[in-house]
């Protein structure tokens, strides 16, 4: 049994680690989406966090928690600076601006010495343990769940539904948007810091356009109306390519097909409490009606 | 209470309001009427800070509103409803009303994250108050439904409850009975009188003459961006200029 577990862990630990990291990334974009912001900067924030933590671990003797703290604070500071002008945009315009920001970050990283340029950073110490990820993911989930139940969560939701009405209910809309953006950057940055310390190597291409879209896909695939959706989406999209190994060369095509089917038939994501409740309600009703006709038949 | 002095507003070359002056007195229902496109909703948008006047001053209880952010104006004590209802449809009625209390919920990040007593007692009081406001408009039995499920008339009443949750001194109603049937109109009329009797001042924009004449203590008439008459309902009804604005001028032929 123990031997089996060792073998399993040796092969699949990376997949399990990525499940946790991707869950944090999906939650980071869930946070901005819950405030009505379609921001695609999360991959870039993840990169900033990853580079900040890696540089500290490789060039100083500071302990791992300090590196992780930096991976949360530097993206937060950057988000604060770029958030103030860009959050005036909405909808696809914000998406384009944040994508542009991601590209700027990539090019800067590509041309800096401290980040290793196009070669990236190699030989990052392997410091991430499984319980680091569990702890930070748990803390993220707990904080987001608490926020949802407070005036902050209600303000986010009100802004998402109707910005003008939210403003006239006394909600300081620009400030709350900035808060969502910065907190999203903190979560994505920490995910980046954790990720860098088990992959051994990072490069500028790891945090570019495709990754930004992947993060968004995970959240939308799972559903963004609550916290379970992003978890479900990130877990299934991390595991899906592994389970598709059977299809060999058609793996990516099968992966894409499943994505398309989910978006077509479950536009609100896999975890949509309203649809699920409606489904069970309908079923219970059918059952009740079935009984009614049965007993009527007997009486007849 | 609310005073507009020499307000003008133009969008580019389009003059929407010209030298508008009027005062909404405390403790009464003040009506602003006028044909389509006269600039009525623009006035409400100016008062709530969504638009800025091109010139002139807006004063509320002695405070100048002309450069204040909308959420600050709400805090000063002005709340509004919208002509095309803007409730939060994916939220429950209770949550809709509690969003209106946003500025009055005082607790910090520690209170939220650690579920401290400061947070719990404020939230409990907010729920209690929200239920009370919903019961004023006889919606309390639906408090936990999604706002989506309400009829048109009920959605309007929810908007009232939400506006009252901001603890306003002055309530702005933008065409409250637009699109309603006669039964709903009569019901809403009673609700508005109810709200006034609880001590709120009301400033209302409306098309429906019977509704305005039956409710308002004082009426101003806006036509092509200018105030053409002001007075009691009886005075307005017999004012020749108002009749002309609404019915047109008789041809001299």
Image (cartoon, grey):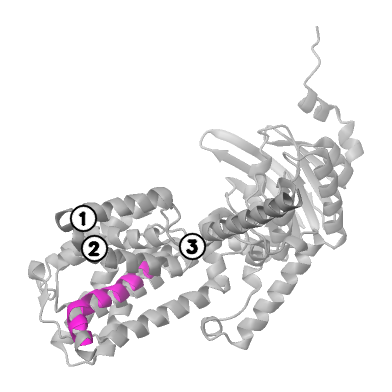
Between the residue at mark 3 and the residue at mark 2, the CA separation in whole angstroms equals: 25 Å
Residue A143 on image: x %, y %: 46, 79
Give the residue at the far top of this rendering: B253
Q: To which residue does mark 2 refer?
A: A241
Expressed as whole percent of the image width and height from the top left, the position of residue B34 reads 74, 35
Q: Are marks 2 and 1 in contact (CB under 8 Å)?
A: yes
Mark earlier in primary sequence (3, 2) = 3
Q: Position of residue A282 (x, y in %)?
A: 59, 55
Quick one: label 2 or label 1, which is nearer the N terminus? 2
Q: Judge depth for marks 3 and 1 and give the one in front.
A: 1
Residue at horizontal 19 percent and vertical 61 percent from the top: A246
Residue A225 badge = 3
- Span highlighted in magenta in the image: A5-28
Dot 2 falls on a residue whose secondary structure is helix
Query: Mark 3 — on which chain does it sit?
Result: A
Is B55 magenta? The answer is no
Are both tags, 2 and 1, on one chain?
yes
């Amino acid at each position: 049994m123990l031997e089996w577990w060792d073998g399993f862990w040796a092969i699949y630990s990376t997949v399990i680690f990525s499940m946790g990291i991707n869950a944090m990334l999906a939650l980071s974009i869930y946070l901005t989406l819950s405030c009505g912001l379609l921001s695609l900067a999360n991959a870039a924030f993840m990169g900033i966090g990853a580079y900040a933590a890696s540089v500290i671990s490789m060039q100083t003797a500071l302990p791992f928690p300090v590196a992780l703290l930096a991976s949360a604070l530097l993206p937060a500071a950057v988000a604060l600076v770029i958030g103030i002008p860009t959050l005036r945009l909405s909808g696809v315009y914000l998406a384009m601006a944040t994508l542009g920001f991601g590209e700027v970050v990539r090019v800067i990283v590509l041309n800096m010495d401290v980040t290793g340029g196009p070669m990236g950073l190699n030989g990052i110490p392997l410091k991430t343990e499984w319980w680091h990820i569990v702890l930070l993911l748990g803390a993220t989930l707990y904080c987001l769940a608490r926020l949802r139940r407070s005036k902050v969560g209600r303000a986010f939701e009100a802004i998402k539904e109707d910005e003008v009405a939210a403003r006239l209910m006394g909600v300081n809309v620009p400030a709350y948007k900035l808060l969502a953006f910065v907190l999203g950057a903190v979560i994505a940055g920490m995910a980046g810091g954790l990720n860098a310390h088990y992959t051994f190597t990072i490069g500028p291409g790891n945090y570019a356009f495709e990754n930004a879209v992947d993060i968004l896909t995970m959240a939308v695939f799972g559903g963004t109306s609550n916290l379970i959706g992003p978890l479900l989406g990130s877990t299934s999209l991390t595991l899906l390519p592994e389970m598709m190994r059977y299809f060999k060369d058609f793996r990516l095509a099968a992966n894409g097909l499943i994505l398309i089917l989910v978006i077509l038939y479950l536009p609100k994501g896999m975890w949509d409490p309203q649809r699920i409740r409606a489904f069970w309600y309908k079923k219970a009703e059918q059952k009740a009606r079935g009984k009614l006709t049965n007993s009527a038949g007997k009486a007849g | 209470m609310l005073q507009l002095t020499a307000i003008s507003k133009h969008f580019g070359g389009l003059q929407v309001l010209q030298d508008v002056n009027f005062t909404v007195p405390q403790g009464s229902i003040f009506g602003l009427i006028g044909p389509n496109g006269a600039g009525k909703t623009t006035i409400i948008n100016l008062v709530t800070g969504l638009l800025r006047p091109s010139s002139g001053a807006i004063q509320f209880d002695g405070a100048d509103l002309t450069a204040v952010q909308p959420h600050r104006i709400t805090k000063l004590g002005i709340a509004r409803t919208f002509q095309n209802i803007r409730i939060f449809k994916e939220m429950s009625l209770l949550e809709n009303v509690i969003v209106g209390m946003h500025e009055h919920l005082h607790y910090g990040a520690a209170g939220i994250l650690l579920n401290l007593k400061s947070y719990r007692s404020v939230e409990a009081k907010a729920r209690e108050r929200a239920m009370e406001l919903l019961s004023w408009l006889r919606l309390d039995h639906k408090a936990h439904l999604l706002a989506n499920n309400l009829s048109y008339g009920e959605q309007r009443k929810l908007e009232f409850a939400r506006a009252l949750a901001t603890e306003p001194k002055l309530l702005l109603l933008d065409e409250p009975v637009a699109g309603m049937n006669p039964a709903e109109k009569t019901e809403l009329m009673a609700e508005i009188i109810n709200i006034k009797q609880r001590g709120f001042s009301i400033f209302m924009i409306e098309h429906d003459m019977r509704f305005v004449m039956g409710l308002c203590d004082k009426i101003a008439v806006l036509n092509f961006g200018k105030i053409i008459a002001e007075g009691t309902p009886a005075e307005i009804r017999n004012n020749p200029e108002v009749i002309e604005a609404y019915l047109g001028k008789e041809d001299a032929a």
